Image (spheres, helix red, strand yellow):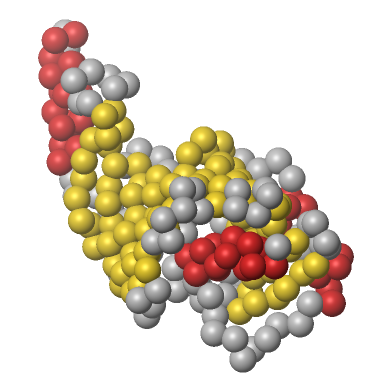
Amino acid sequence: MNVLNLLCILSLVLLSAAAQKPKPCHAPPLMNGRFTLMDSSGLFPHSTGEISYDAFGQRMLIRTLDSNANFTTTDLLMHFNQKVYYVVDWNDFTCQKRPLDTSFTPIQVPPGAKLMGQVIMGSSSSWGMGMLVNTWIGFLPTGMYMTVFSEIGCIPITMSSNTTEGWATVSTFNWVLGNTDPMDFIPPPFCARAQLDLTEKPDTFFTALKSLPQETKAEN
């Protein structure tokens, strides 16, 4: 088999793979990156910070740096398997334990999501000029969501939610595979005193992240 025939076969294989309909995917199990949040309040950005994900333990750490409250550092530690999350304020060493609605797990295409479309971000004119991404939409009890993941690697790019309380969009970037500190996913010792208030309506990923800067600003 000569080189020309081999290249033709490889081209057909690649075209066949590209023609397949995208399927829901899971991001790599251990990831660390950064994010910004924008919402209908008009603030730009609403908050920003770091995000770490552990699929094995079904845990996520969101470390916010709130630009609207003198850059207050606060952690959201989400334990999806326990349906709870912790709000950890490192400025005064306080901790709140709240119920978590786990119907939406952010670092994956949710079950039941429908493919809205596939596009190339950037240019397809040459290798390395663009990235193939898939957009997925679905509905939660609180409203509609839309997520964008890369076709290769299933890397999350944006996550949006639209409810009666308004919209919120989380943009992620600078993802690195792996986590450097497993202690990030363990609540600090002073959280042992926190009591879960079962009378509260469980927060989703979006409502928890959206409400945090507003609460911090009100306290200051």
- The residue sitting at the bottom extreme is 199
* Residue in the foreground of this view, choosing between 116 and 168: 168
- Left or right: residue 68 compared with residue 118: right
Q: Residue at x 57, y 75 (%)?
A: 100
The C terminus lies in quadrant: bottom right
Q: Residue at x 43, y 61 (%)?
A: 41
* Residue in the foreground of this view, choosing between 143 and 79: 143
Q: Residue at x 77, y 53 (%)?
A: 183
Residue 50 visible, this orientation: yes
Relative to 157, does residue 159 appear above or below in the rendering? below
- Left or right: residue 167 compared with residue 177: left
* Horizontal and vertical percent position of residue 162: 34, 67
* Residue in the foreground of this view, choosing between 33 and 207: 207
- Left or right: residue 21 compared with residue 113: left
* Horizontal and vertical percent position of residue 195: 76, 82
Residue 26 visible, this orientation: no
* Horizontal and vertical percent position of residue 196: 71, 83
* Horizontal and vertical percent position of residue 70: 68, 50
* Residue in the foreground of this view, choosing between 164 and 188: 164
Q: Residue at x 24, y 62 (%)?
A: 114
Q: How many marks?
A: 0
The N terminus lies in quadrant: top left
Relative to 197, does residue 93 appear above or below in the rendering? above
